Amino acid sequence: MNKFLNMVKWREGLYPFITDEVSAKKAASYGYMGITIAASFNLIILSLNLIPALMGQSYQSAAGFFDVIIMLIIGFFIYKMSRVAAVAGLLYVLSNIIYKVYIGESTNFVLQGFLILWLISGVRGTFAYRNYLNNKK
């Protein structure tokens, strides 16, 4: 029985149950958290890549900062419970993963898998939240 409860807790952390307005908001916060963590990792990697540029070597990933800004804007609107932003965030991350695989760039599939699950929870949460709000009226 205890093993089953641990599995439920593990599932709740990746793909939460949505039963009411509060749990929908919690699920949507997973999408916000996931895209914010991904933007933070990208910002750290871009900052570390700036070190060779400061030493006179060429720097080619300036577009990565634009990527971080887009992710943070999407995260802000997921935080505000925007359904469009939740779907756009999921599609944006999926398209980035597909593009990186297509060009042969290495990617961390475990981290990307968690990110996708969190963004799916964000989509579920934002849609459920709006549904609960509309049913309240």
Image (spheres, helix red, strand yellow):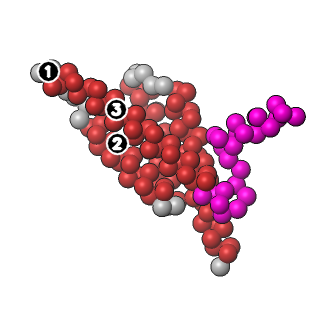
Q: Is residue 92 magenta?
A: no
Q: Position of residue 103 (x, y in %)?
A: 38, 25
Q: Is residue 4 magenta?
A: yes
Q: Position of residue 66 (x, y in %)?
A: 29, 43
Determine contact: label 1, label 2, CB under 8 Å: no
Q: Position of residue 137 (x, y in %)?
A: 65, 79
**Residue 21, numbered label:** none
Residue kind at label 2, given as amino acid type: Val
Residue with the mark numbered 2: 68
Looking at the rendered image, the quarter that the N terminus falls into is top right
Closer to the eye: label 2 or 3: 3
Q: Is residue 79 among the parts visible in the rendering?
A: yes
Q: Which residue sits furthest front?
A: 2
Horizontal arrangement in the rendering, residue 11 relative to residue 100 (left or right): right
Residue with the mark numbered 1: 55
Spatial CA span between label 2 and label 3: 10 Å
Closer to the eye: label 1 or 2: 1
Horizontal arrangement in the rendering, residue 38 relative to residue 69 (left or right): right
Q: Is residue 123 among the parts visible in the rendering?
A: no
Q: Quadrant of residue 114?
A: top right
- The first of marks 2 and 3 along the sequence is 3
Q: Quadrant of residue 100?
A: top left
Residue with the mark numbered 3: 44
- The first of marks 3 and 1 along the sequence is 3
Q: Which residue sits furthest right?
A: 1
Spatial CA span between label 1 and label 2: 24 Å
Q: Residues within 10 Å of mark 2 (few under 14, many from 20)?
A: many
Residue kind at label 1, given as amino acid type: Met
Q: Which residues are magenta?
A: 1-25
Residue at image point 52% right, 30% down: 111
